[in-house]
Amino acid sequence: MTLKGTASLVTPSGVKGLSFADEATTANALVPKLKAEGADAIVLLIHQGGKLPQFTTGNACDGLYGDILPILPKLDPAITTVVSGHTHWAYVCNGTVETGAGRLMTSAGKYGYFVSDLRLRFDPSTKRLLEQSATNVVVGNGERGVDAPEQALVSRYAAAVAPIANRVVGRLTEKATTDTDDGESAAADLIADSMLAATRAAENGGAQIALVNATGVRVALPSGDVLYKDAFAMMPFGNNLLVMTLTGKQLKAAIEQQYAIPIKPGRSRPAALAPSDGFTYAVDMTKPEGSRVSDVRLNGKPVSAEGRYRVALNNYLASGGDGLSAFTQGTDITDKGIIDLDALVAWIAPGRIPRSRAGSASPASATAARRSSATCASAGPRLRCEAGRASRCRSGDAGRLRARRSRWPARAA
């Protein structure tokens, strides 16, 4: 069963015309039909899932949290077994406070590290479910399986792609880190800057601003030599970069939508829309939805509500992904077929003079250190970021936090 929120997690054009209903309501509506058809037990396979406070061997449940929890108590008691997913966390919860008495819920984690051995025992005469259990069994050593034919197939393709995957595409002066809360980070900023660089030219859209959803930044990039496979792991989606015209009012409305998204369980702050260099905005989560974003600036100058700005986005956000429907109001859209990964690779690669001009190449100099700072204040649910691109906070007096832009991974020879 798909997520109720599927429409905000995938490219909207891919699910146009489809609707996604409440999971519990949908499952419960099927119970009478399944019983009438003679079902002795009902197992719900649902994409939604939960997380644990820390990684385990896959068979714990203590401290489970996440979006699956509000669904469970609404399920019909006839649904005794739930196989969940989505979060990539492995767990087994059998008759716990979270699942309720008589209900088993499992998740096998990710990437085939585990196989859930699920066992249901019935009374042979009455066909009544007597008990159930589950164990997440580690496959191989937890990272690599031991099936020889499959390993041979994987090795064949790994060898074929190795020359591409292991090609050095750039170099970073330090690691481009991600943020555990999907907030702004050196990695997200690096991507936003690469998007702006790829689309700034008039023939590519004339972008002035680039924004990237930090939730889409999959991994960090290492310091030193960066391989193509590193960049691919960070940006595996193959999204096109689009440039659109938005008024200042529309741009602010889109950012407001980002900070209207509820903070996810277990996280301390909302996910961010990471900006390209020169674009900043302030967020105050204590204010009502629609009024949390202020002091929006481009190159230090206030963004005018009536002004028109060229904004670069990936096609996922441009079509309203993550529930940011304000981006669909953009006009004069330019799509030159530039892929986000290609833009990232070009940005971190050494700069070269085109041979048609000089007949030789020379590396570009390293980009300068970060140039702005941010102030955050924390008081319970309060979070205020006075400028974009803040990557670290440290404790200060009276619960205040000071974040400063540290030297960032730049392209270098």
Image (cartoon, helix red, strand yellow):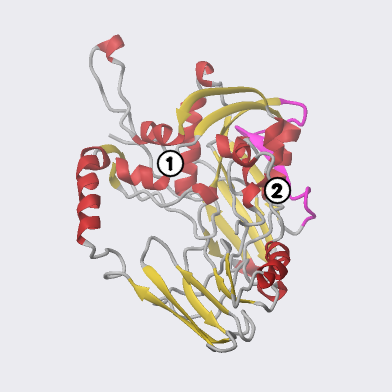
Q: CA distance from mark 2 to mark 1?
A: 46 Å
Specify the label residue 369 is tagged with. 1
**Residue 303 visible:** no
Residue type, numbered disc 1: Ala
In the image, is residue 172 part of the stretch drawn in magenta? no
* Secondary structure of residue under mark 2: loop
Vertically, is 55 above or below 180?
below
* The image quarter in which residue 149 lies: bottom left
Q: Quick check: 53 left or right of 343?
A: right
Q: Position of residue 413 (x, y in %)?
A: 27, 34
Question: Which mark, by number, is residue 19?
Answer: 2
Question: 367 or 325: which is nearer to us?
Answer: 325
Identify the residue at horizontal 69%, vertical 33% (top origin). 328
Q: Are marks 2 and 1 in contact (CB under 8 Å)?
A: no
Closer to us: 413 or 45: 45
Side of 228 where 219 appears, left or right: right
Tell me the crowding category of disc 1: few under 14, some 14 to 19, or many 20 or more residues within 10 angstroms, Cα based. few
Left or right of 363: which side holds 344? right
- Using a 10 Å C-alpha cutoff, classify the residue at mark 2 as few (fewer than 14 neighbours), some (14 to 19) or many (20 or more): few
Tell me, yes or no, whether the highlighted magenta stretch contains residue 305. yes
Q: Residue at x 37, y 63 (%)?
A: 112
Q: Is residue 382 above or below residue 72?
A: above
Residues drawn in magenta: 287-307
Could you tell me which residue is drawn at 51 percent across and 52 percent down? Answer: 391
